[in-house]
Image (spheres, helix red, strand yellow):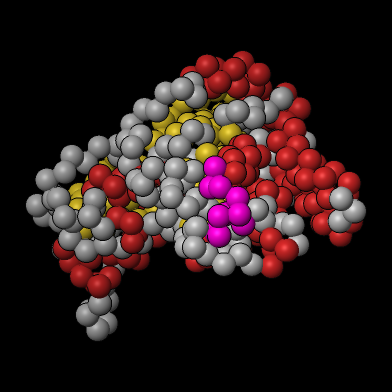
Amino acid sequence: MPSEKADNPGAVLAGFDASIDVSPAAPLDPKALPALGAVYLLSDADDSPIFLSVCENLRRVVPPRLAADANDEPTKRAKLGEITRRIRWKRTRGAFEGLLWHWRIARATFPDRYASMLGFGPCALLRVDPAAAFPRFEPTNVIRDDGARYFGPIPRRKDAEALVRLLEDAFDLCRDYDILQKTPNGERCAYFDMGRCPAPCDGTAPMSVYRQSIAEALTFLQAPTESSLEPVQRRMRAAAESLAFESAAAYKRVFEDGLRLPRRTAFAYLRDVNAATWIAVIRAGVKRKNTDETRLKAYRLTRGAAVELQTGAAGDIKALSESWRMEAPTDSSPGPANDVRLVTESMRLLSRFLFKENQRDVFIFPQDRWPDDDAWTSA
């Protein structure tokens, strides 16, 4: 996660716990650095940032990075050892907090190039603009300031594509967007003949009918329940009454798939990204002889803004959980609420941990699905 010379060398370097000065004339004593996980920043003689990274053990990682054997060919690592004059660090506990603070510090220190330094991994999203001339659901991996609504996180693009197909089958949406864009001069396809599309493309059905189908699909996406699948049941009954048993069976299958959606891992955390608030809980310290004294820390993430919440003992998790709940109102958005770039990046950060099997680094959940007492015990 390296970067070259910072774009804003005069930036205020806040948020670090400690720092030490170093000199190329004297080897760095590893014991001068703590053997802890940290985000660290190297600065030059003018105190301008030159390198930012995150590691699991500061003492083990930084000294070799700065060391340069005189017999070695010139390398970027050797250059760092020659020009570094100060090391700053921010202690972090675990991979999630390390990546979170690296992201925050990188944004402030290298605003023009920090995105290339992040190690979040991929994340897919679902986009829909109900007000568009020809609305549709489509997979994407970037949130834009375009008035559309975005849902996620989804671990992979193929999962987002599968969700689009489910919505198309359940709510009789157009499968060929090129034809839809020709409305009302398009040529209806075979799905109309199968009774699975109202054919707005050639004017058989008005666009108002199609927009209603988009609205029904959007309602289901926000709350995938049997109630929101009522339009599918209605179509299933109508198909059966008209003796179109094959279509009725297809609607029945997609109805059952829709009911299972919240239980599928890829869609278990699906939320409107601009309305959702997430809570991430990490271990802030462990007392091995008494697990009740384990310290827990929480962060609230809302529309790209991350706010640190209260730290407390795991033995008092009920009271601590309630304090987090009261500290994290869903109707407010502190920080950079309207920066869609940060919203995209926060979705990628969450996705990295939400869909990682057997990870114990962080416990993440949406604010609107607060865990009960038993869930805290097993988390």
In the rendered view, would you say 266 is above or below 312?
A: below
Residue at x 90% of width, y 53% of height: 243
**Residue placed most toward the observer, 152 or 48:** 152
Look at the image and tell me in which quarter the N terminus lies.
Answer: bottom left
In the rendered image, residue 167, in percent from the top left (x then y), is placed at 65, 51
Spot occupied by residue 113 in the image (x, y as percentages of width and height): 26, 58
Side (left or right) of 353 relative to 103: right
Question: 24 or 151, which is in the foreground?
Answer: 151
Screen quadrant of the C terminus: top right
* For residue 336, above or below residue 242: above
Q: Can residue 53 be seen in the rendering of this structure?
A: yes
Instruction: Give the percent coordinates (x, y) of residue 260.
Output: 78, 46
**Toward which corner of the image does residue 52 lie, by quadrant?**
bottom left
| Left or right: 330 as drawn, with respect to 341 | right
Q: Residue at x 46, y 46 (%)?
A: 129
Q: Nearer the viewer, residue 5 or 107?
A: 107
- Whether residue 136 sits left or right of residue 38 in the image: it is right
Q: Is residue 193 left or right of residue 82?
A: right
Whether the magenta-drawn stretch holds residue 97 is answered as no
Classify 51 as above or below 378.
Answer: below
Q: Which residues are magenta?
A: 199-208
Asked if residue 166 can be seen in this view, the reply is no
Q: Residue at x 9, y 52 (%)?
A: 46
**Residue 90: percent from left, percent from top:** 35, 42
Number of labelled discs?
0
Q: Residue at x 22, y 80 (%)?
A: 74
